[in-house]
């Protein structure tokens, strides 16, 4: 009975890690799209036009993206910590498929 419970926990842990990694990947993709959109705006401004507001907006966006990247890094570190702790438990492999 305990082996089944351990296997169930391992399966739930694997699913959780996959969901976390998937959410990190989606967030990274969205941040990349935001930066690309801002870069395109910067490419299309006229050299002699007033760019102060666009520069401020770009600075704010980059600062926000930087903070999000830090949070995503922490999230990834937590996933890796969970992975590391789980491997230290030396639990036997689960035979059930998590699909």
Image (spheres, helix red, strand yellow):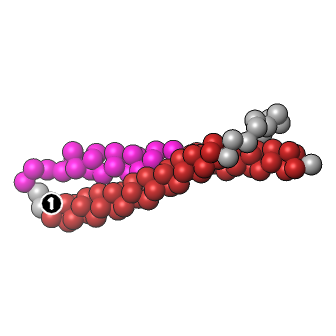
* Residue 53 picture location, percent across and down: 20, 65
From the viewer's perspective, is residue 29 above or below residue 65? above
Of helix, strand and loop, which one carries label 1?
Answer: loop
Seen from the viewer's position, the closer of residues 15 and 29 is 15
The x and y percentages for residue 2 are 87, 50
Q: Quadrant of residue 61?
A: bottom left
Residue at 63% over, 42% down: 87
In this view, the residue in front, 63 or 57, is 63
Q: Position of residue 4 (x, y in %)?
A: 87, 46
Answer above or below: position of 92 versus 27. above
Between 90 and 38, the one lying in front of the other is 90
Query: In the image, what residue occupies the spot 81% across and 44% down?
Result: 7
The answer, for residue 14, to whether it is visible in the render is yes
Determine the main secondary structure of the stretch shown in magenta: helix
Q: Is residue 66 above or below residue 29?
A: below
Count of numbered labels shown in the rendering? 1
Q: Residues within 10 Å of mark 1 (few under 14, many from 20)?
A: few
User: Label 1, on which residue?
Assistant: 51
**Residue 20 appears in the picture as rendered:** no
* Residue 31 placement (x, y as % from top left): 41, 50
Q: Is residue 91 left or right of residue 78?
A: right
Question: Which quarter of the rendering shows the C terminus?
Answer: top right
Q: Which residues are magenta?
A: 23-48
Q: Is residue 31 magenta?
A: yes
Question: Is 93 positioned to the left or the right of 69 in the image?
Answer: right
**Residue 46 colored in magenta in the image:** yes
Between 1 and 53, the one nearer to me in the picture: 1
- Relative horizontal placement of residue 59, taking residue 47 as reference (left or right): right
Q: Going 18% across and 51% down the picture, which residue do you hit?
A: 45
Q: Quadrant of residue 56?
A: bottom left
């Amino acid at each position: 009975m305990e082996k089944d419970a351990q296997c169930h926990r391992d399966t739930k842990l694997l699913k959780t890690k996959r969901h976390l990694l998937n959410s990190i990947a989606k967030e990274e993709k969205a941040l990349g799209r935001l930066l690309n959109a801002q870069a395109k705006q910067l490419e299309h401004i006229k050299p002699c036009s007033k760019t102060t507001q666009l520069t401020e907006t770009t600075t704010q966006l980059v600062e926000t993206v930087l903070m999000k990247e830090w949070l995503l890094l922490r999230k990834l570190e937590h996933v890796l910590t969970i992975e590391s702790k789980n491997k230290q438990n030396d639990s036997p492999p689960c035979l059930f498929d998590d699909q």
